[in-house]
């Protein structure tokens, strides 16, 4: 007779936690002041902070922008489960990069047992890593709180002054909107194709040459299927756009900035101005 202990689930040491995938261009359900902001306001904020961190990539500017991103995430009720899990190989790469950068030395220096160690390289690596995380957080906030259909019309509205220079702003906005809408759809299609390919019965090849040949043939088949699916989806999307009035409807949206958007832009300008002032003050005192 089989006991309950013999049919129980694997022990805690044998269980594996499923990694959280990276979810892009899919807004988190719910409403918040951040969700209700105009898409153009969020794009302007990301652009402004990107320019700020390009010219002033110091700890003060990074800290202020990171604090603002965390505050926006708290206001938007972004759950922790929205963050993707970090794979182990990425931690290994970061560790190797940090050790390599630390070997460069530089100021400041500390004395340990009669030896001077330069911390400049390690601090620069940490600063660049923090800068990258903040920029990824800015992009993630736009992705989590903005509907993809709102980005194209926002780009068309922001690029309206460029029409005087005969720049095809509307066409660019339509191309961007279609690309953003098709990107998640194509990712799902490629995942389905890859899963279906793995379920197909395979003959075990003998020898390295046979294995390389099989991998090459599988790659060619997968690319051919992906191109076919992409063309089919593009044809379906073209028919849907034509039935809804053409591409002009994609970039046409009456949404405009409201009072909350001007308040958000004022906060962005205030944080940017404070970061520039503090960074300039620190540079002059050094």
Image (tube, rainbow, N blue to C red):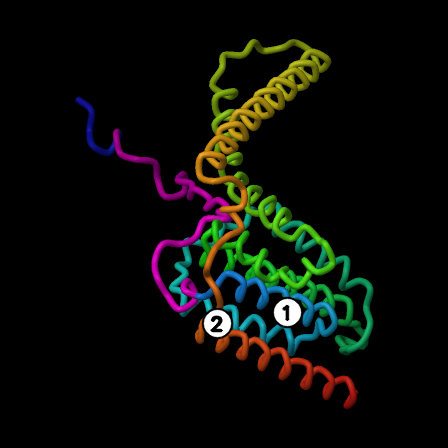
- Mark 2: which secondary structure? helix
Q: Which residue lies furthest to the bottom in this view?
A: 285
Please tell me whether residue 42 belongs to the stretch shown in magenta. no
User: Which residue in the protein does label 2 denote?
Assistant: 261
Q: Which of marks 1 and 2 is nearer the N terminus?
A: 1
Q: Is residue 241 left or right of residue 117?
A: left
Residue 48 is marked as 1
Residue at the (51%, 42%) spot, across then down: 181
- Residue range of the region highlighted in magenta in the rendering: 7-36
The span from disc 1 to disc 2 (Cα, nearest Å) is: 15 Å
Please state which of residues 202 and 45 is positioned toward the viewer in this rendering: 45
Quadrant of residue 215 within the rendered picture:
top right
The x, y position of residue 166, in whole percent, is 72, 54
Residue at the (20%, 24%) spot, across then down: 2
Label 2 crowd (10 A; few <14 / some 14-19 / many >=20): many
- Mark 1: which secondary structure? helix
Q: Is residue 6 left or right of residue 138?
A: left
Residue at the (50%, 52%) spot, across then down: 252
Please state which of residues 253 and 24 is positioned toward the viewer in this rendering: 253
Please state which of residues 187 and 162 is positioned toward the viewer in this rendering: 162
Quadrant of residue 12 within the rendered picture:
top left
């Amino acid at each position: 007779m089989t006991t309950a202990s013999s049919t129980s689930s694997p022990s805690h040491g044998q269980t594996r936690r499923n990694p959280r995938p990276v979810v892009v261009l899919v807004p988190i359900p719910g409403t918040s002041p951040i969700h209700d902001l105009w898409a153009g306001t969020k794009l302007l904020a990301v652009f402004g902070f990107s320019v700020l961190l390009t010219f002033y990539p110091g700890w003060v500017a990074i800290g202020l922008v990171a604090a603002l991103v965390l505050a926006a995430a708290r206001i938007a009720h972004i759950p922790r489960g929205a963050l993707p899990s970090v794979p182990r190989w990425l931690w290994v790469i970061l560790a190797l990069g940090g050790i390599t950068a630390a070997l460069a030395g530089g100021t400041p220096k500390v004395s340990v047992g009669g030896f001077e160690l330069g911390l400049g390289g390690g601090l620069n690596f940490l600063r660049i890593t923090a800068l990258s995380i903040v920029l990824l957080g800015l992009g993630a906030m736009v992705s989590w709180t903005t509907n993809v259909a709102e980005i194209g019309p926002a780009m068309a509205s922001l690029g309206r002054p460029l029409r005087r220079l005969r720049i095809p702003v509307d066409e660019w906005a339509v191309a961007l909107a279609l690309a953003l809408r098709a990107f998640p759809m194509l990712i799902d299609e490629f995942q389905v194709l890859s899963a279906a390919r793995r379920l197909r019965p395979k003959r075990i090849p003998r020898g390295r040459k046979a294995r390389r040949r099989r991998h090459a043939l599988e790659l060619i088949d997968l690319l051919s299927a992906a191109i076919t699916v992409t063309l089919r989806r593009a044809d379906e999307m073209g028919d849907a756009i034509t039935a809804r009035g053409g591409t002009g409807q994609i970039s046409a949206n009456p949404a405009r900035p409201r009072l909350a958007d001007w308040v958000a832009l004022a906060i962005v300008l205030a944080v940017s101005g404070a970061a520039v002032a503090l960074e300039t003050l620190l540079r002059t005192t050094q």
